[in-house]
Amino acid sequence: LWVSGRQYVSWRRENNDRINLIADKGSYKVGETAEILIPSPFSGEQWALITVERGDIIHHQVLQLESNSQVWRLPITTDHVPNVYVSAVIVKGQDADNKVATYKVGYAALSVEPEPQQLTIELTPSVEQAGPGDTVSYEVRATDHSGEPVAAAFSLDLVDKAVLTLSPRPSGAIVEAFYGRRGLGVSTSSGLAISINRLLLEQWERYEEEQRAREGIEAPMEEMPAPGAPMPTAVAKVAVKEAAAPPPGVALREEFADTAYWDATVVTDRSGRASVEIELPDNLTTWVFRGVGVTAATEVGEATTELLVTKPLLVRPVTPRFFVVDDEAQLAAIVNNNTDEDLEVQVALSSTGLTLHDDEEQTVTIAANSESKITWQVTVEDVEKVDVIFSAVAGEYSDAARPRLTTGPEGTLLVYRYSAPEVVGTGGQLTEEGTRTEVVALPPRYDDRRGELLVQLAPSLAAGMRDGLTYLEHFPYECAEQTVSRFLPNVLTYRALKDLGITDPELEKRLPGLVEQALNKLYLQQNDDGGWGWWYSGQSRPHLTAYVVFALDKAQEAGFEVRDGVIARGLEYLRGQVVRARELKSYREANRQAFILYAMAEAGDVGYASEYTGDLFKNRQKLSHYGRAFLALTLDLVDAGDKRIPTLLSDLNNAAILSATGAHWEEKDYDWWAMNTDTRSTAIILDALIRLSPSPSQEEGRGGGLIPNVVRWLMVARKEGIWETTQETAWTLIALTDWMVETGELRGEYAYLVKLNGDEWTSGAVDAGNIDQSVKLRVAVAELLREQGNRLDISRGEGPGRLYYTAHLRVYLPVEEIDPVNRGIIVYRQYRHANCTAGKKCPEVDEAQVGDVIQVRLTIVAPHDLYYVVVEDPLPAGAEAIDVSLATTSLLDQHPALRRQAEDSQWGEWYYWWWHWYSRTEMRDDKVVLFADYLSAGTYEYTYTFRATLPGRYQVIPTVASEFYFPEVFGRSDGRLFTIVEGEQ
């Protein structure tokens, strides 16, 4: 409560130029009048400049103040929505009380409710309750603030309420987006002062605090990790029996969805009405239907309505999301009787891949409007996936369902192995009629229940490259490098096939969506400085940025549209990373500069790149082999006749290493930040030889005779059709694509024959119809000769073309021999009860009750600096990692944390917490994954929690830590058994 009058008021006078204007209300509606008290500290004659501001001066008035408690009135109009700022600058001239002219400035922030701009939206379903699979119609009606119907464009969606409970979406987001609080955007200055910026800042901060207090603004939610692909651990090769099935006549619910409907193009007519029909999925849940609308006059609004979907008798499966071979678990079905009578219900579990220790069908009596839990004890067989269907039948009522949350195809549960594979391989090529013999010998000890010999025949590089392209396209992680590697080789292969006059309808259909998805991710991941880091918002890395710019340019060349300015910003960042060669202190810096110059030249910035190539050539002793290859390619882009190119190619030819499997290059040291390996170097050098040799497909010329041997070595270096890292795979596919174009080798016509131990395994003929298709042959290790070598004969007949082949033997160590492994990284895993208080000795546990929260503590020892580290910690199948970003997670649950144990550090605890050691964490159905760009030598501790959810005795696969681009540097913990029991009732 305040009053004002003409009498002088002795307002507090401070030693600054500020006063506080006082508004009579916290917020206003259009049509009301705001009253603002101007508490002037001056007496006598004084003038004020009154302005209404927001991004501009909306209104101004010069006013002679009648008193030093003047009230100024402002009629609120639609122009003032959502808020305005009233400013008063009081100027006081010289008089008896003021030796010099002076002034005071005051601001008041006025909030104006956007009622005239808000729509009233009514959403009406055709039924109050529905069943799974029903078709439901919704009517949408939109009116303005006065109740008149309006034509509006709508986005309509139907989302499972359970999902929204886990991750709520903000209410009224469209109103906030269009009519949320806006900044001042106007500066006021006077010749009587140096600056009043402090006033504006303080007023703005005060206003924000007041708004938070009034509105209870919430902090933004953390980004949820995207759902991930299954862990790349090998799965069993044993065939699964026929799929599980419900009882005859019982409809199976298996089409589940989190979002049942979304259409952003619905428009109401002049009467403000529209209607849509939606076929519901099989979820038994409450669906939330939302309409978000906007008119041509920017009137906006949002509304929701709920629809219950249920059945008189329903079954809810309770299973893990995956299994490990030999898991012993308790599966359950919760059956709800929603009728008003007691029911005798036959509840059944139909399955494949499981050994049941209880009767498949059980009969229970369930009281009216109640539920019952029926359980089965099962053991998981050595299969690829488990299929389960739960059913309940009671007279006219019935229901059947697969589990809702699964990891396998078509609602199945993936089964992983608790074993360690060892893989060896060989390969070659037949360019003319003849036979090549390989001998395959088994090791002294192995698990004969699993493992295989895989032989792959490829009549062309295009056929041999298919697995690599598929591997990259479906790679389970999505950092910037892997996003590029996912689409770049596909783009270049598409261009190559097109140049050769060959069509690939499947690739042509799939590629646009693949590229568009990748480009959109890269746009989001680009940092403000124009560069890219390993993950979103990570520190920009010059090498990664060069790789992205190179890929974007190739996509653009292939006809795909790249958003304006993205490449230019990337190039601008790269220019800032280039230095004179004398400033390059290591071969890593020199290699990085060579690749940056190559990427810039490929992207059209030839002039800038040319300024540094000569300097780098003079200092080429600083470059690794692959760095020299990039420099040669850059010189060729600047001037194809550059006489320095032969010198670089000669250096590379002389450094090649010849062996029985072909030719390759080995670097003296790993280039960690560049993600480089010997295979990657070999691929990059091969591409340089192909593109720069005068006649690369002939035996003569610079590098010409060497190239086929390099191609052979790279084809042999694959394991099951792919190379060890995404970088190896991407650069190898790029080089092989260029070789395919150079040789035009997609021409072949000959017969082939494969024998194993003298018996024909397969035979066939190559022609234009199958030149780009490979043949894969598999045989279980149990069928191979154990005491002597197995003879593998590969033959081809007369005719043009090449026949590439590889043979890889995969064997598994027995389970009891899986011990921890240290090959550059030491990993140790501990389970403890999360409620064990700090300061106490917390014992390890291997058993928990359902509902217990277990803390997982991973100790990672890095004897040396590590680069691009990935730690994968598989979960017990009966447990769920706790995602603290979900709205339903208890505040008592712990955030995952990676800490360096630095008690001996000279920096003490400050250093302990200062460095963010990890780049990203992901909590998946079957594992928790940690990524770190760089770990300096030391000991680290990563902790997270999981909740025990389902009773059973579970095999826990070892934790594995490795360098992503150097997988031979890795460590593995031991495996373990973890038991979960029912809690006390």
Image (cartoon, helix red, strand yellow):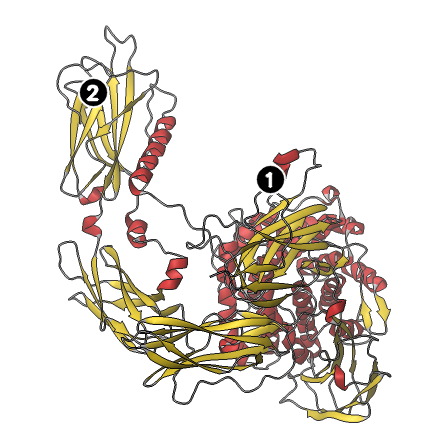
Label 1 sits on a secondary structure element that is: helix
Q: Amino acid under label 2? A: Trp
Between marks 1 and 2 in the image, the one whose residue lies nearer the viewer? 1
Report the residue at 61% width, 43% height from top. Answer: 840
Answer yes or no: is residue 276 visible: no
* Label 2 environment density (alpha carbons within 10 Å; few <14, some 14–19, many ≥20): some
Q: Determine whether, in the image, residue 741 is placed left or right of residue 157.
A: right
Q: Nearer the viewer, residue 612 or 449?
A: 449
Q: Determine whether, in the image, residue 692 is placed left or right of residue 218.
A: right
Q: Identify the residue at the far front of this view.
A: 985
Q: Determine whether, in the image, residue 425 is placed left or right of residue 843.
A: right
Residue beneath label 1, please? 913
* Residue 962 vertical placement versus 460 (above, below): above
Q: Nearer the viewer, residue 908 or 317?
A: 317
* Residue 223 vertical placement versus 690 (above, below): above
Q: Amino acid under label 1? A: Trp
* Residue 839 vertical placement versus 643 (above, below): above
* Residue 665 vertical placement versus 75 (above, below): below
Q: Nearer the viewer, residue 321 or 492?
A: 321
Residue 225's spot in the image, x, y percent? 50, 58
Quarter of the figure with residue 849: bottom right
Residue beneath label 2, please? 47
Q: Determine whether, in the image, residue 310 is placed left or right of residue 818.
A: left
Identify the mark nearer the N-term, 1 or 2.
2
Quarter of the figure with residue 292: bottom left
* Label 1 environment density (alpha carbons within 10 Å; few <14, some 14–19, many ≥20): some
Residue 237's spot in the image, x, y percent? 65, 80
Report the residue at 38% width, 63% height from top. Answer: 162
Residue 453's spot in the image, x, y percent? 74, 81
Label 2 sits on a secondary structure element that is: strand
Circle on res. 554: none
Residue 8's spot in the image, x, y percent? 17, 14
